[in-house]
Image (cartoon, coloured by chain):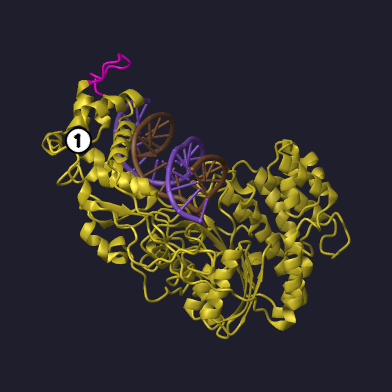
Chain colours: A yellow, B brown, C purple
Amino acid sequence: MDKSASGEDSDNIDWNTDDELEIQGDTAFSSSSTLTTRGTEAFASSGEASSSSGVPNSKLVNHFVGMGFPEKQVLKAIEENGEEDTDSILNTLLTYSTLEDSPPKQLCVNSDPISSDYEENLPDDLSDLDGWSENETEDNTSSLSEEHKNLLSLESTGSLSEKEKMLLSLANMGYTVEESSIAMERCGPEASIAELTDFICAAQLSREADIYLPDDDLKPRYNGVSKIKKRKFFEICKKKNDPETETIRLPNPMIGFGVPSMQPENINRSLPDSAIGPPFFYYENVALAPKGVWDTISRFLNDIEPEFVDSKYFCATARKRGYVHNLPVQNRFPLVPLPPLTIQQAFPLSKRWWPQWDMREKLNCIQTAIGSAKLTERIRNALERFDGDPPTSVQKFILDECRKWNLVWVGRNKVAPLEPDEVEMLLGFPKNHTRGGGISRTDRYKSLGNSFQVDTVAYHLSVLKDMFPSGINLLSLFSGIGGAEVALHRLGIKLKNVVSVEKSKVNRDIVRSWWEQTNQTGNLIDFEDVQALDGDRLEEVISYVGGFDLIIGGSPCNNLAGSNRVSRDGLEGKDSSLFYDYFRILDLVKSIMSRSS
DNA sequence: CTCATGATGACCCTACTA
DNA sequence: TAGTAGGGTCATCATGAG
């Protein structure tokens, strides 16, 4: 609707290849091929290298001249970067050549022809539920305490002290400012959010927590917890103070309790009684989180050992994730048809252009951002200086960038980032799952980058098929583009009622659209905000659907993920702390369901 | 053999600009 | 809205000393 550009689906990047072959450097190949050093690092450590004398090391200059760069540029690049950092010199040289050689650019316009207004489609008898969802989430500060609002307004002015920031975090998690203050006093100024929440939980439980007291201001939003839980919380607190508690380590190979092609030597999976369903639950997040994060997650989720799995055993791309769940691990089966397992199988057309020195068989983790056009241009310019294989140092530069940005070969000397529909395929979604309906290309990459790998999750969920032949009721938190829903559907597990909570409207629209296109016969009810899902609302939903069979969700990872250079704050980060809402809601659902059964 | 040390590589990203 | 630049943590591996 808002896009007026109309574009065909044809290859929209068509650099004028022939124009730029004649740039300097035919002399390059012969001289560079005589070099015996592996990579440019050798020069940095060579004894001849004279530092800061102002006269560049002639060997170093010759090296780059030998690669086909003009001497003038080489001298300039060395001057800018110093002699030590040969990688930067190379990078600068490649930038120079890009600037000089850049061909006339064609804009890459990828318009989405499909646009549809989608209508809310809720069961009539749930219209009231929908109503409160919409109303509350429009302005979800309306139900907050005065103290909480004050903190929020202070936050916007950036004038919060450390203590106030902590208070705000706790308040955002649903605790009252008062109980949070008490906890902070008792636990001391150094206490982490996890310690504080543990303290609050323990305090809660120690004062008659099983009794439902809706008007008690000191009560957090989750309530009605069992006595087993009470004991559990004290164990949590005790364990944390034990210095000998060893941290969780990642397995190698990262195959969890097994992947279709491989089984670990010994599977010893024993769940604590308190963890045994119903309901089943399944929690997901990035495996390579800062230290201690998985210990905390595991501690909150019944001390269940996380199952760490790399999706490279299920598809052509890596995706290292941890899954905490109480599902059985025997008799799993994979989705069929099996997806391509290597880059070559996934992109057969690329084989023609794939240089023999690029040995990648699997792609790295698909992220939310893609490589830039300038980079792929630099790579092409670097390659076109040579008739045959480029020197090792250039190969290394290109391979490093290809790995960093998941580039694939799409033409002679041409690499490119993956297209959104290729990402959909790699992650196990139907083609065009995220396309159209008003979502931008950038947002498609973002939503896909934040999603499950469907084949991996489906393998874990496959055990549900025999257990629930008539279908399941699903509570899906942080649904995103519906990875869990797609996985269950592809497994042939009927979705009776799906309550889906997802903040992003474009993502909700994607799931709704998928739901309609797949002729589902169940009900899809969606909410926006996990934090607004309190005990009362869950009771309403549970009494409507008759209890959940599976509670699934992967809470935000952006404060845990390695790619975040700005706010990798751990589980207490602004978004990743929503994990505690997964825990809170899971706990509530369990206690509500155990009360009513 | 164990252990310390350093090198290498991967990473569900955010903030700015035009 | 797309494009661009931007750093640090952690696990693994190789190496060498004890």
Q: Which amino acid does label 1 sit on?
A: Met
State the image coordinates of residue C8 (x, y, percent, origin top left).
51, 36
Q: Callout 1: residue from which chain?
A: A
Residue sitting nearer the eye, A430 or A222:
A430
**Left or right of A8 in this view: A130:** right
Q: Is residue A456 or residue A205 the one in the foreground? A: A456
Q: What stretch is highlighted in magenta?
A: A46-57
The residue beneath circle 1 is A67
Question: Residue at (33%, 33%) from the top-left corner?
Answer: A92
The answer to whether residue A282 is visible is no
Q: In which quarter of the image is residue A595?
A: bottom right
**Horizontal side, residue A319 vs residue A296: left or right:** left
Quarter of the image for residue A36 reads top left
> Residue A37 occupies which quadrant of the picture?
top left
From the viewer's perspective, is residue A53 above or below residue A119?
A: above
Above or below, comparing residue A264 to residue A541 in the picture:
above
Q: Position of residue B16 (x, y in %)?
A: 55, 40
**Residue ID at (46%, 52%):** A369
Magenta-colored segment: predominant secondary structure: loop
- Whether residue A53 is in magenta: the answer is yes
